[in-house]
Image (cartoon, grey):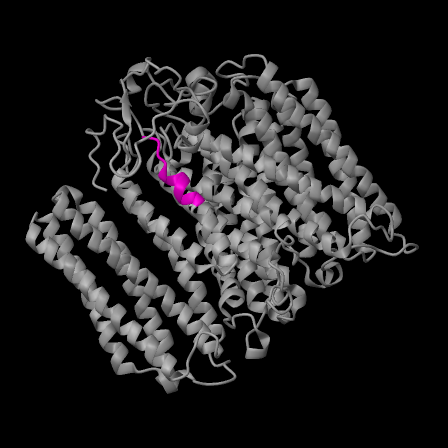
Amino acid sequence: MESGHYRSTKLPDIKLMMWIFLASDTMFFGTLIGTYLVYKGRSLVGPYPVEVLDIPLTTVSTFVLLMSSFLMVLALHALRQDDTFRFRLWTFGVAFFGSIFLGFQVYEFAHFVDLGLTLQGNLFGTTFFVLTGTHGVHVTIGVIWLLSILVHSFVKPWTSKDEVYLEVAGLYWHFVDVVWIVIFTVVYLVEFA
Amino acid sequence: MAVSKVTVAAPAGSGVFTRPNWDAGWLSWLTTVDHKRLGLLYIFTSFLFMSAASIEAFLIRLQLAVPNNTVLNPDAYNQMFTMHGVTMVFLAIMPLGIGFANYFVPLQIGARDLAFPRLNAFGYWIYAVGGLFVYSSFFLGGAPDAGWFAYSPLTSLSNNPGNGTDFYMIGLFVGGIGTLVTAMNLIVTIISMRAPGMTMMRVPVFTWMMLVTAFMIIFAFPPLTIALFQVIMDRTFGTLFYVPQAGAMPILWQHLFWIFGHPEVYIIVLPAFGVISEVIPTFSRKPLFGYPVIILSGIFIGFMGFAVWSHHMFTTGLGPVVNTAFALTSFVIGIPTGIKIFNWVGTIWGGKVVFTTSMLYAISFLITFTIGGITGIMLAVPPFDAQAQDSYFVVAHFHYVMGGGALMAFFAGVYYWFPKMSGKMMDERIGKLGFWFLVPGLHLIFFPQHIAGLMGMPRRTQTYVAGIGLELPNLLSTAGTFVMMIGLILLAVNLVHGLLRGKPAGNDPWDGRTLEWATTSPPPHHDFDRQPVVNDRDAHWVQKYPESVHGHRVPESASEPYDANGIHMPGQSWYPFIMGIAFLPFSYGLLYHNFWVLGLSILIFFVGTFGWAFEGVGGHHLPAGGHAHPKGARS
């Protein structure tokens, strides 16, 4: 989405745009996490966090998400080397691992609802589902984005000249990962500290 | 994605829509991606909303003209002051600044357009859609009535069962997205698309202030957006974010709102500072006094703007430590603002001042804004604030800052830039006549409100009793409304008169200093025939009078043709309009809990994203050197 005119920086427009978007997105998540922390421990009825949160399960899904970031690095590296096969393989891998993470989240949500934790039940439910749900939407968008890149690469082969488009998707993906690390710490680990 | 730059010569579309390629006709305004046209759309739309807000203000003042008046019943009164505030802040003054930025930031930095022209169009359309959506509430069961800051728990479903609050929450949620993407677009443009030689310390002050403003927007709007989202969730899906019975704390809304709301004050006022910093040097015929200090003060305000929000909450019982801290930060933020005032006065000092209408508005800004600033410092003192909180003193204060400050500066901008935008002059006699109604009228409205406030008149109250000394200030205020209204009407008359009968302006009617005066009035569709090259601050002035500033002219040969292919003009597109309009079914679907309509809009959005991406930037090239203006391509 760039015209060929003079640029005063070396940075591609869309890459700068993504950094600025991520700066802004930090405030979105910051506000949601802030709300979660402000309301932490204020639920009047259960279920309370320690009764439902399952650290081993979420540790596995967190690990999967972190590994997907690793695959993202490999995919970008492969594209820069014009290694089309590995670029497609790793890009698929990122989307696949992202989907596994989403699967864990769907299971977790369903399981929590079974345990009586709902959006409307108590403040923990309200803040937990909205925070992790917003993160889940981000992951979903990332998965769709990466799959679109994958499909597009079969329509019109991607080469190292297109690396910035993958790099931008990668920036987004890594950011969503980092946000999850904060959420995992603040929402899950702190409860058992 | 992955659009190659050279092979876009044909305007052929890939996907559902044929790529539109209209230069004239109303359809060309729906599909335009040109920053100048979008700037005009922003300015025009904000004036429409401002007219609505003026009518609301007029009704409020009619109601308060005499004690125990019955022009508006309490319910209608609540809707009027809420909508007046919402409109002026979100739909009138802020978009006016963004409109000027759209038009003049690329021209001032010698860029062809914003970095993402289609995204720019998208931003405009959701602003328009969000505004229309909020206004449709008048016909659909009543407008929002919980004040422009919509404090929780006034907005809970049990306290406010009508749809008005939903219109507020959803409308601002949607409109905020438009503001966010436009701000991101402006940041990329200003950082990356400055002309060769235009270092950051040569960037015109208006553009600089827009850069700071855009950064404030991207950090300030998310807290508001999330807070609105939380209330939407509460009202639509029964979550508990602001339900005290479940342990929630409604004061969280105040914090989130003011973490947005105080930066918002500067989001409105920094572009106004930018306009003033263009107008005063031009009409004092001197360089801006202390350019680096003005810039650094602006950046300092940008940071400090996020550290003062709790001064809106001194009376909520946060405790003496918090109040003291926020009082101190609020005093500190007065310093850079004061520095700027001295810089502008220093610019006028010793200058050959030309008293055009634009300059008159700029000078009235200096005086009125200073008065508003001084009452602001008074209100930053917690004990005083405890007395004046929620009284007409506060109303007077922020109308001096927003109305007498930001709005007067933008009117200065209207008179200053109208010749560039239209190619015609506005009438100075009508302008000055209007000025002498508008500004004295403004003071007549708001000065007595200081006194009414100190006498204890509460704001947001539909009426007052006779015999406690409030009659005179209120009657004066209402009388002022009529005086100011004459000024506003004369301004509107002058705009129409200028468009129809104005004398030709020429390229540079004010002997201007910045690059926008280097091109024709109105600028051609492609802005500049050749890529401007800059080697000093006040680039256009140096080009005209190098000896006066010990500068040197950039030789004609240094100013390059754009590139080997000529000037790239991005293609028009249907997608920004369609995806903007898709927010209408989204908003109504969410409001009326019709999840089919909601789903439909999300589907349009989903498909539209792909259409948008694969359509690519498209467009065509004008020949390099560019004297061949294609027929009708002038905006």
In the figure, B150 relative to B133: above or below?
below
In the figure, A118 relative to B397: above or below?
below
Q: Furthest-right residue in view?
A: B467
Q: Furthest-bottom residue in view?
A: A51
Tell me: B589 left or right of B331. left
In this view, the residue in front, B321 or B61, is B61
Tell me: B104 left or right of B2. right
Q: Mark yes or no: residue A73 visible.
A: yes
Which residue corresponds to the image point at 20% horizontal and 55% vertical from the top-left? A147
Residue B355 falls in which quadrant of the image? top right
Residue B162 part of the magenta-drawn span: no
| Stretch of the chain drawn in magenta | B571-581
Q: Main secondary structure of the magenta part?
A: helix
Residue B36 falls in which quadrant of the image? top left
The quarter in which the N terminus of chain B is drawn is top left
Image coordinates for residue B150, horizontal then vertical, percent: 61, 59
Q: Mark yes or no: residue B353 visible.
A: no
Residue B579 part of the magenta-drawn span: yes
Image coordinates for residue B90, horizontal then vertical, percent: 56, 46
The quarter in which the C terminus of chain B is drawn is top left
Image coordinates for residue A48, horizontal then vertical, percent: 43, 84
Tell me: A106 left or right of B243. left
Image coordinates for residue B318, horizontal then vertical, percent: 62, 70
In this view, the residue in front, B428 or B204, is B428
Which residue corresponds to the image point at 71% horizontal and 26% vertical from the top-left? B434
In this view, the residue in front, B594 or A189, is B594
How many numbered marks are there?
0
In this view, the residue in front, A21 or B70, is B70
